[in-house]
Image: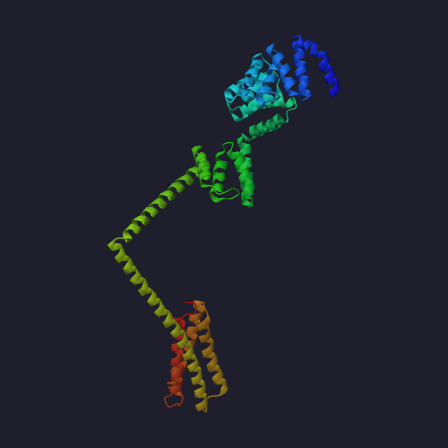
Amino acid sequence: MTEQEVRYAILQAQEKAEKGDVISQHFLGISYLGLKDYGMAAKWFEKAAEQGYADAQMRLGLQLYNGQGVIEDKAKGIEWIKKAAEQGYARAQFHIGNFTEDNLKSAEWYEKAAEQGDADAQYELGLLYFNGKGVPKDNIKAGQWFKKSGDQGNEKSKEFLSKVIADALFDQPEIQNQRNAAAHKFYMEGNHKKAAELYVEMADRGNAVAQYKLGLLYSLGQGVINDSIKSNELISKAATQGLKEAKDWLEKEELERKEREEKECKEREHQEWLKTEDGQKWQAEQYRLKEKKRKKEETQKLLWKIGRIAALLLTVFSIIMIFVINGISEQVDNSVVISLLLFMIIPFTVIYFCEGIIKRIIFFIVGVGFAILILSIFNNFPDYAETPFLNIMCISYIISCVLAIINVKDKY
C-alpha cells in the first residue's frame, strides 16, 4: 500500500476505533507504525492493549522497552509483553524469553513459543540445548529445533544444524582418530598452525590424544602462542582420562619442577654461606687456585710458543749445516744434498703443520729414523772430516722433530 492508501484506511478505521473497536484500534497502531508515527502508534496500541488484545500488548510493551514514541520504561514494557505471553501469544513469549536473564526461565518461554511454530524461538531454544544453558546439553534436541526453524527459512538455524551434525560425526572414535592422524601429518610436514587447528577441534570434544598433543604445542609455542598454563590444563585433562603419555609428561614436569626448586634452594643456601666467614675464605682460596691455574696455562702457552719457534729454528739450523757440510766436503755432490734436504724438510713440515695424529707419528718415525740412520752410519767412520757436523745436524733435527710433535699446531 502507498502512504496515501494507508492514510485513507486510517480515516476509514478512525470512527470505529474511537468507539472502542479493538480490531480498528490495533489496525490504527499498525498503520501509524508503518508511517513511523510512533507516538500515535503507541496511543492506539495502548487502547487495544487495555482491552486485552495480545499483539497490541506486545507491541506497546516493545515501544515502552525501547523508548520508541514514548518515554522509555523497561519494567512497564516487559509487564505488557508478559500479559500477551500469558495469553499464549507466541511472539510475545519469544520476546519474554529474550528479556529474561535466567536461562532456565528463558528456555521455558522459548519452548512455549517454539511449540507454536515461532522460528526465532525454535532457533534460540536449539541454541540453549546446543550450549547446555538453562537445559541439559542435548545435541539431538538442539538439532530437532534447528531443523524446524531452518525449514521456515531461518539461516542461522541451518548453520547450527550443520554444526550439530558435525558434532555427531566427530563424536565417533573412528572420525576423531582420522582427524588426529591428519593433524599429526600436518605437524610432521611443518604446518604447525593447521595441526593446532585440527587438535583444537578434537580437544574441544574431549579427545584425550588431541588434548595432550595440543598441550605440547602450547608448551613449545608451535602453531599457537606459547602458554604454559594452557598447556598444563590440556595435558591434565588428557591425564584425567587415563592417557599414559599425558600422565608421564605431568610426572616428568613435576619431577623437573622439584629439581628446579631444590637447585634454587641450594643456590640460595650457597649464596648465604658465601657471606659467612668460612664462605669468604673459600672464595679467596678459589680465587687463588684460579689465578694459579691461569698462570700455569700462560706459562704452558709461552713454552709452547718457544717450543714451536725452537723446532723451526733447529730445523733451519739443520738445513744450514747441510750446506756447511757441502761447502767443506769434496765428496758430497748436489744430489746427496737435495736428498738430505727432502728427507729432512718433508717429515718436519708434516709433523709441524699437520693436525692428524697418525700422520704426524708416521712422519716423526720416518724423520727421526732417517737422522739416527745417518748418525749410526757416519759414526762408524770417526776419521771422516764431516762427521762432527753431521752429528750436530742430526741431533738438531731430532730435537726439532721432538719439539714439533710435542708442541702440536692445534694445542692452543
For image coordinates 67% across by 17% down, the residue present is 30
Quadrant position of the C terminus in the picture:
bottom left
Q: Is residue 65 left or right of residue 33?
A: left
The one nearer the camera, 230 or 36, is: 36
The one nearer the camera, 399 or 85, is: 85
Is residue 159 in sight in this rendering?
Answer: yes
The one nearer the camera, 294 or 388, is: 294
Question: With respect to residue 217, does 388 lie above or below?
Answer: below
The percent position of residue 147, horizontal first and vertical second, equals 61, 23
Q: Residue at the top extreme?
A: 19
Question: With respect to residue 5, does 163 lie above or below?
Answer: below
The percent position of residue 376, horizontal first and vertical second, equals 38, 82
The quarter holding residue 86 reads top right
The number of callouts visible is: 0
Tell me which colouring the rendered structure shows: rainbow
The percent position of residue 124, horizontal first and vertical second, equals 57, 23
Q: Residue at the left extreme?
A: 277
The percent position of residue 190, horizontal first and vertical second, equals 55, 46
Q: Is residue 229 left or right of residue 48?
A: left
Question: With respect to residue 77, does 374 lie above or below?
Answer: below
Quadrant position of the N terminus in the picture:
top right
The quarter holding residue 383 reads bottom left
For image coordinates 54% across by 25% down, the residue present is 130
For image coordinates 32% across by 49% down, the residue present is 267
Is residue 370 in sight in this rendering?
Answer: no
The quarter holding residue 279 reads bottom left
